[in-house]
């Protein structure tokens, strides 16, 4: 269940960030409200995951995958582009998350 909570937190954080972009500086009320609800829900589920996953591990996964998924949304939805260094950096982030989960004794499985 702990990784389901963490996955929900990640998806909701990406949703919140996407609607933050769509809110156009809080000038559009509906995207602003969706953004606020997504962030509040995100932190609720992150707090639930933190009951059993160490903070450092949960935050590394949450932030790392959040970065990668938010960048993917920015390309697909907002038609923004990523250059090679950005893609390489994100691949390194993914590699870090894999290393933490596969080899760290800190990660709780």
Image (cartoon, rainbow, N blue to C red):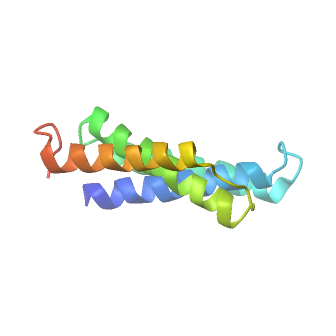
Q: Using residue 33 as the reference point, say whether residue 100 is left or right of it.
A: left
Picture quadrant of residue 100: top left
Count of numbered circles on the image: 0
Q: Using residue 96 as the reference point, say whether residue 78 is left or right of it.
A: right
Instruction: Please give the name of the residue rendered at 52% of the width and 50% of the height, measured from the top-left corner.
Output: 87
Front one among 19 and 91: 91
Front one among 64 and 36: 64
Task: Give x and y (percent) for residue 28.
Answer: 87, 53
Task: Give x and y (percent) for residue 84.
Answer: 57, 48
Residue projecting furthest to the top: 56
Instruction: Please give the name of the residue rendered at 10% of the width and 39% of the height, measured from the top-left corner.
Output: 105
Q: Using residue 10 as the reference point, say whether residue 33 is left or right of it.
A: right
Picture quadrant of residue 57: top left
Q: Is residue 42 visible?
A: no
Q: Is residue 31 above or below residue 56?
A: below
Instruction: Please give the name of the residue rendered at 64% of the width and 49% of the height, measured from the top-left corner.
Output: 17
Which quadrant: the N terminus? bottom left
């Amino acid at each position: 269940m702990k990784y389901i909570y963490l996955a929900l937190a990640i998806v909701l954080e990406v949703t919140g960030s996407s609607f933050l972009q769509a809110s156009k500086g809080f000038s559009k009320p509906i995207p602003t409200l969706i953004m606020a609800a997504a962030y509040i829900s995100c932190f609720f589920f992150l707090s639930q995951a933190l009951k059993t996953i160490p903070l450092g591990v949960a935050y590394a996964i949450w932030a790392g995958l959040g970065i990668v998924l938010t960048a993917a949304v920015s390309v697909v939805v907002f038609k923004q582009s990523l250059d090679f260094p950005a893609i390489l950096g994100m691949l390194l982030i993914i590699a870090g998350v894999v290393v933490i989960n596969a080899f760290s004794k800190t990660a709780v499985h």
